[in-house]
Image: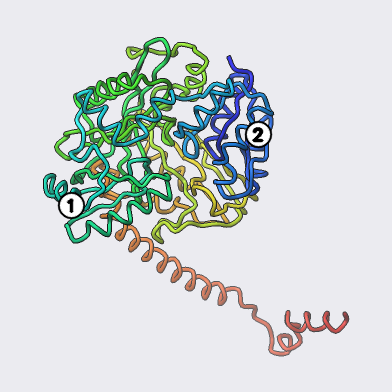
Amino acid sequence: MFQKILIANRGEIAVRIIRTCREMGIQTVAIYSEPDRTSPHVLIADEAYFVGSAPSTESYLNVPKILEIIKKCKAEAVHPGYGFLSENCDFSEAVQKLGVVWIGPSTDAITTMGDKMAARKLVIKAGAPVVPGTTEPIIQMEDARKTAENIGYPILIKAAGGGGGKGMRIIHSENELENAMNQARSEAKKAFADDRIYIEKYLEEPHHIEIQVFADTHGNVVSLGERECSIQRRYQKIIEESPSPFIDDKLRKELSKTAVEISKSCNYLGAGTIEFLVDKFKNFYFLEMNTRLQVEHPITEMVNGLDLVKEQISVAAGVELSFIQKDIYPSGNAIECRIYAEDGFNNFAPSTGIINELTFPLGLGVRMDEGIRIGQEITPYYDPLLGKLITWGNDRQTALERMIRALGEFNIVGIETSIPFCLRIFQHKFFQSGKYSTHTLDLIKNELQRDVNVQNEEQILAARIGAVQSHHQLKPEVSPLKNLQQKTNWATAGRKEELR
């Protein structure tokens, strides 16, 4: 087993990895930018090295500097977490050239599955269903028009070289096509240094369902069940749960079998996620594969009683998985709520500032994966994710009730967060019933906004009434003479100023 691991990341995922390493008796090395100098992941690591100034291009994406630190600290392995360099095949290859183990899949798998069009070709060859669309980049407008006519509007324009909603546009008619393609190319170029785009059919009322897979060097490829990830803002997830309230046992088995076959077809190693779109008729289509640990991995851990980071490290060290498919019997329900430094009631506007007060929720079935502390400054340089709140229960209702209770106890002062907005989502009838899709948040966000405006107006009115009542009740009954003799705060302050 490894003696020392460098975590090429920051925030809550770096803290998450360090905690598992501690349990395994492995020393940890953190890297940090100027604003992160006293962040939690730096404070709890065994060693920490300065990697660069605030912009991620000069710090957490600074490959030469990170490689220099890997050599200096003599790390035996590198865990990339998620985001930043986690799916960067050049970085993975450079790490391995140093004789250091990459805790993740092979460079070939990252390259193939990270390229959305290459992944579509491989999946089609493996016999799995894909959303109708192109397998080659769209360059000419005429080709785009013909493709759109063949598959029918609405369509999606997507970036070939990345995900997370970057470079993605929904097109409802030919009039929007040219402008949207230009915008998508520009955004993809900035985000991934790759301006290739392709076209897919836009599905109505789809569910975003993903299957967690795990593979080792001993021939084991296992599915750990599904996660429902359909509550999203700007194509990025904010709430996930496992199991999905929409998926039945038959479809669950089909999705898991397909995910395992896709993983085998690219000779996968370690933790990975196969993402599917499932329409309202329960037809499913391959969407993409994430060749890394997912943000929402804790809900899979909670229902399966596993530590996926521990398994990642063990598999990278050549150890066989601690489980096989017949050992996987998910128990209960788990829900994850991502806590962002964003104002959900103001179109998810980012919020920056210093955390002045902080209270994490506790109690039975509650887990908090965090990367923040009191006194920490939240800057605009990185992803606004502050942490993840996870609850578990024997059934969905129990997990949901615990989530609502825990969010009510959660308190962050100094910045705006997504906590109040998410609490409203969990209380809404669509989520309560489990009848929601990727379009649901767009349908109900105005309703949520109206509800909070009404509540705020009621609270302000109640506060005014209370203040007037309190004033009249507490007003001292004194004689006019005594009242005239009473010194005011203004008089006292003036006298002090004269004495200076």
The quadrant in which the C terminus is found is bottom right
Residue at x 59% of width, y 19% of height? 24
Residue at x 88% of width, y 81% of height? 499
Give x and y (percent) for residue 47. Answer: 69, 31
Residue occupied by mark 1 = 142
Q: Give the amino acid at mark 2.
A: Ile
* SS assignment at label 1: helix
Residue occupied by mark 2 = 44
- In the displayed orientation, state which residue is furthest to the right: 499
Give x and y (percent) for residue 140. Answer: 23, 50
- Which comes sooner in the sequence, label 1 or label 2? 2
Between marks 1 and 2, how big is the CA–CA gap?
Answer: 56 Å
Is residue 497 shown left or right of residue 433?
right
Residue at x 33% of width, y 39% of height? 229
Rendered image quadrant of residue 125? top left
* SS assignment at label 2: helix
Q: Nearer the viewer, residue 136 or 310?
A: 136
Q: Nearer the viewer, residue 77 or 343?
A: 77
Reply above or below: 267 against 437: above
Label 2 crowd bin: few (<14), some (14–19), many (20+), radius 10 Å: some
Is residue 62 shown left or right of residue 330?
right
The quadrant in which the N terminus is found is top right
Q: Give the amino acid at mark 1.
A: Glu
Residue at x 67% of width, y 35% of height? 48
Q: Nearer the viewer, residue 485 or 27?
A: 27
